[in-house]
Image: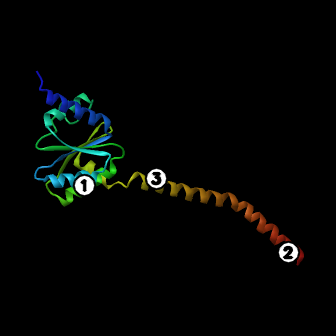
Amino acid sequence: MANPEKVDAVAEITELFRSSDAAVVTEYRGLSVDQLKQLRRALGSETTYAVVKNTLTEIAAREAGIDVFEGQLSGPTAIAFIKGEPVEPAKALRDFAKEHEQLVIKSGYFEGNLLSVADVQQLADLESREVLLAKAAGAMKASMSKAAAVFNAPLSKAVRTVDALRVKQEA
């Protein structure tokens, strides 16, 4: 018979997997409680950073329909469950890991795929969604300005030609 505490823990982790858009698996060996609090604050309110038991996490992931962590979890594990855009939390984890060598990013999960450490680093290197949207809008605005200039060119050329004819006839 299953221990009720473990059943509750699996249910809680399963819900975290289901409600999150991405997850980053880390090893936190050697971090103090204060450092973990600091990391949680850096991750923001949309990210839940939870210390988890490996076997229970594998069971919970399987129950949530995520099979990429099978056999991947070892050592003291904590997972950042990310709701929304994963770029900012990935940056926070990367930056915190640079400052604190004890935090090791091991892998991740995003859109049904297992992420390697390099994938998580690439995610962290992306610019935020807002910046990318602003760049796209700027590029579209520049294209529209060029198009407007092209469409106005024949009209302005005709006006200059008529004005030149008028000046010539006056002379």
Compare residues 33 and 142 and report the one nearer the observer.
Answer: 33
Q: Amino acid at mark 2?
A: Lys
Q: Which residue is mark 2?
A: 168
Residue 115 falls in which quadrant of the image?
top left
Q: Residue furthest bottom?
A: 171
Q: What is the crowding at mark 2: few (fewer than 14 residues within 10 Å), some, or many (at least 20)?
A: few
- For the point 16% across and 33% down, which residue is it? 56
The residue singled out by tag 3 in the image is 133
- Residue 165, x across and y down, in percent: 84, 70
In which quadrant is the N terminus drawn?
Answer: top left
Quadrant, the C terminus = bottom right
* Residue 135 located left or right of residue 73: right
Q: Earlier in the sequence, mark 3 or mark 1?
A: 1
Q: Amino acid at mark 3?
A: Leu
Residue 127 higher or lower than 166, as above or below: above
Q: Which mark is residue 94?
A: 1
Q: CA distance from mark 2 to mark 3?
A: 52 Å
For label 2, the SS is helix
Kind of residue indicated by mark 1: Arg
Element type at marker 3?
helix
Q: Position of residue 58 (x, y in %)?
A: 18, 33
Residue drawn where x is 20% and y is 52% of the image: 37
Q: Position of residue 117 (x, y in %)?
A: 22, 48
The answer to whether mark 2 and mark 1 are in CB contact below 8 A is no
Residue found at the far right of this picture: 170
- Provide the secondary structure element on which disc 1 rests: helix
Residue 148's spot in the image, x, y percent?
65, 58
Q: Is residue 46 left or right of residue 167?
A: left
Q: Closer to the N terminus: mark 2 or mark 1?
A: 1
